[in-house]
Image: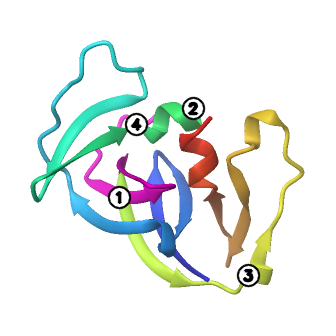
Amino acid sequence: MQFVIFKLGEEHFAVETDKILSINDMMAITKVPKAPNYIKGLINLRGSIKSLVDVNLLLNIESNKEQNNIIILKVDDEELGITVDEVEEVLEIEEQKLQKLETHNTEAYIKGIIDLEGRLLTVIDIERLINQ
């Protein structure tokens, strides 16, 4: 399985590459009045308007760092972006390294944890996170 590894605050996260359409630098964001608080706004990516989700809010992560990247994801039939502090790398990781978690309601969006030589990666189930 291939994963894109990114940082939010001091934590490392991973999303499967088959859910990712592109990785972009930060761009102009148009605020949307009365949108839910986790919607940062809209972006215009090569003539296509996409919603931009503040994944820090959905994951309850405090980060004072400047967010430098936008990951464009395909969730169901919708394309949207999430802002991340930094995209670090793309890695091929064997599926058996993914340790499943006993999920409670609050962790329903976490597929599992990967211990990558002492660096813990939280694998996000992006469909569940966005559709909660």
In the rendered image of this protein, does residue 50 appear above or below residue 29?
below
**Residue 65 visible, this angle:** no
Classify mark 4: helix, strand or loop: loop
**Identity of the residue drawn at 46% across and 41% down:** 55
Q: Which residue is mark 3?
A: 95
Do callouts 2 and 1 mark residues in contact (Cβ within 8 Å)?
no
Nearest to N terminus: mark 4 or mark 1 = 4
- Alpha-carbon distance for marks 2 and 1? 19 Å
**Left or right placement of residue 74 versus residue 11 in this view:** left
Question: Which amino acid does the dot numbered 1 rest on?
Answer: Ile
Which residue is identified by label 1? 71
**Residue ID for mark 4:** 54
Camera-nearest residue between 1 and 13:
1
- Identify whether 20 is placed above or below 8: below
Residue 73 position within the rendered picture, expressed as x and y whole percent measured from the top left: 41, 58
Numbered badge on residue 81: none
Q: Callout 4 environment at 10 Å: few (<14), some (14 to 19), or many (20+)?
A: some
Instruction: Say what amino acid the circle numbered 4 marks.
Output: Asp
Q: Say which residue label 2 marks.
A: 60
How many numbered badges does the structure rendering display?
Answer: 4
Q: CA distance from mark 3 to mark 2?
A: 27 Å
Q: Is residue 55 inside the magenta stretch?
A: no
Cα distance, mark 2 to mark 4?
Answer: 10 Å
On screen, residue 27 versus residue 52, left or right, reads: left
Which of discs 2 and 1 lies nearer the camera? The answer is: 1
Cα distance, mark 3 to mark 1?
Answer: 22 Å
Location of the N terminus (image quadrant): bottom right
Q: Earlier in the sequence, mark 4 or mark 3?
A: 4
Residue 87, horizontal then vertical, whole percent: 37, 64
